[in-house]
Amino acid sequence: MTPPPPRGGGPRPPARARSRAADDLHPRRRRHRRRSRVTRRPRFALAAAIVVSAAAVLAAGTFTGAATLGSNCDLDALTPARIGENSFVYARNGDVLGSIPAEKNRQPVGLRRMSRWLPKATIAIEDRRFYQHGGIDAEGIARALIEDIRAGKVVQGGSTITQQLVRNLYKNVSRERTVERKVKEACLAIKLNRTHTKDWILGAYLNAVYYGSQAYGVEAAAQTYFSKSARRLDLVQSALLAGLPQAPSRYDPFRNPTAALIRRNGVLRAMVATGAITQKQYARAAAQPLRLKAGKLYKEIKEQYFFGFVRDALIEEYGAETVRSGGLRVHTTIDPRLQKIAGHSIKSTFPYKNDPAAALVSIDPRNGAIRAMAAETPGKKGNQFNLASQARRQAGSTFKTFVLAAAVAEGINPESTYYLSAPFRYSTDPEGSCDDEPPTAWCPETYDESYIGTTSIANATLRSDNTVYARLTLDVGPAKVAAMARKLGIRSSLKTKDGAYVPSLGLGSAEVSPLEMASAYATLAAGGIYSRPRAIKKVVFADGKVDRSWGEVKRERAIPDGVAYEVTKILERNIHSGTGWPNAVIGRPAAGKTGTTDNHTDAWFCGYTPNLTTTVWVGYPRAQVPMTSVHGIRVAGGTFPAEIWGKFMREALSPAPVLSWRLPSDWPNWISFRGRYAMSGGYSTSDDDHDGYSSGYSGGYDSGPSSGGGTSEPPPAPTPKPTPAPAPAPAPAPAPAPAPAPPPPPPPPPAEPVPPPEPPISP
């Protein structure tokens, strides 16, 4: 053990020796001194590097320095960065329906459309000599140099607003902390400063800088944090936003309110230092809370089904990138008042969570504008599947309208042409049976399994008699029914997987969407003129260019107005004395048809007036669930669908004038007609009978004197049998007595008030 040194006045060892001795006794002190020597060297190196960088940056500020950088300091040689901008969708009256979701939320606004406090707060905290320097700030660089040396690391960059804007505007400018990057950035900032005014630079910066929470630019930030526009921000709110760009995550007011408050007050002190506010204003502002109000502009979407329909159409036309960040302003045809009525009509009818879903589409038949597109699935929110435009379900008896139109177009008079209402069996195999599993014959029945014998086509329409329309479909031909449906507006494929048109098409076996059905019935409402359904009036691009092609009304004559008129007359009677009564009665001229599929899995009502066409579908969206007990009843087209339709149409049309049907100029030319299946009780076909036509259409008309195509009364009704006749080809019922051809219809009376075509139609 080493003895302690003597207390007396012996010779003192040298200082270095004393230090070593002390270190031997105090290891902690020895480690501290070693670290001090180690850190002192990098600090000097850092200072030297920063001085060199500062000198290089300042040198770049001279004309010679900028020139020597050559192409590295050429604004024209740089690739502009795509900052992006939100696209918004607007209703017919200008209300915002929503912003199309994007990775960045951004809405550029002019400097004059910002609060006066925003530029002052930003300049105070980011670049207080902004209006004095030429793009780079020597004083700022020196101030940052001192802070960096004190901290022993780079804590302040000394970048001006102009330098920061350079990084945001151009892809080629890296964000690495290197001398080369600093020099290039400084040179570009000087050139940008010479090219643009200070106000332009400040405005561009405020519209590009990131404020956190996906908000780029002050307008998006104001909407995100305060639910208001940048113009309406006060001093306290402006100071908060001005402090965010330096560290958006650290100062996020939603997650770190305390840090955000401290940072805001720091901005306010900087504003006092620059003379932007007084000490009294500072004291009052610093005492206030954050007063945040999270915005919904970029998250909330009104009328989500229609919104999604519009978004998909835009993406198909312009591409996803342009739609999401191209700054589009999309003006649509949707009417918020009608949307509200549609939603209320559905919800008031189906208030319970286990109720079926419903979809409603309403179209202006005069120009194809979609005025309402609503869907409700009780008990479920956020359903992304558009029941109104994407869902395809069997149309049921609403498809009979197309059979009727095809018959009238062929000259078959529905008032004087008679068919048998009785059980019916159809098969291409004489031995086919509906009792086989699976069935080898087609055996349609009426909804209530009741039959009335011989009846006119018009009366069978009011009863929605499946057996009459099965026979009529075979006589007209399934292919002609499909062609008529397409003319009117159906765009889904109506063929089977084998590529054939089958007789059951006439009873609605094909799957279609509510939008298609509304479009097709709108053609009848317009007197046989088809208008392409349109949801968009115009699209305004970020640069101000306008695409008006969306708003072009594309109309074409689909069928003669006389055909549409005859069909409409029958469907009008259907509302007042057929399957549409009483729920679809709305107190003004209207026409419509019910539809119900097998097992009650889908129920429809399609109806129209001269100025509005609406289709309602009811069912369960995820599966074909029988609706045999909803609110205690079996759901059919004349129940809830007609009820929803009636509620909607009565209120939607309440401010509109009552219009009558326009009399046609091209009346149908009736022919004497006797359909092959008109009086058939049960029929089995063969290839020999039908020339190999797979869908079973026999073709041909019987124009003889006993065709039954006149206006005479029908023969006595045969007694219907409960089951189809067993014979493969029973004899038809006796034909009525020959009757003279019906007289030509009278010309339209000149006194009939006819509404003007377009205007007053608004897009």
Image (cartoon, grey):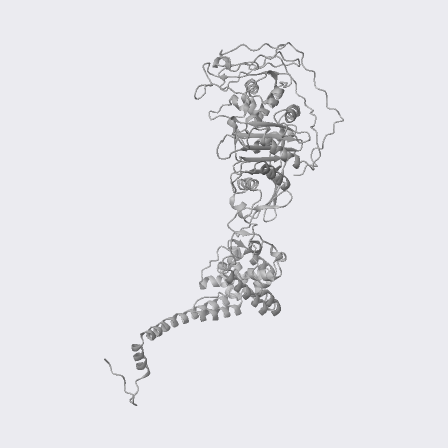
Residue that sits furthest to the left in the current view = 1
Residue 148 image offset from top left, x and y in percent:
46, 69
Residue 656 place in picture, x, y as percent: 69, 36
Question: Would you place residue 527 above or below residue 246 in this image?
Answer: above
| 501 relative to 537, above or below | above
x and y percent of residue 666 in the render?
Answer: 68, 23
- Residue 676 placed where, x, y %? 56, 14
Could you say which is closer to the camera, residue 133 or residue 321? 321
Q: Is residue 12 left or right of residue 595?
A: left
In the image, what residue occupies the spot 51% across and 11% down? 729
Quadrant of the rendering where the C terminus is positioned? top right
Foreground of the two, 33 or 570: 570
- Residue in the foreground of this view, choosing between 608 and 357: 357
Name the quadrant of the N terminus: bottom left
Q: Is residue 303 visible?
A: yes
Observer able to see residue 614: no
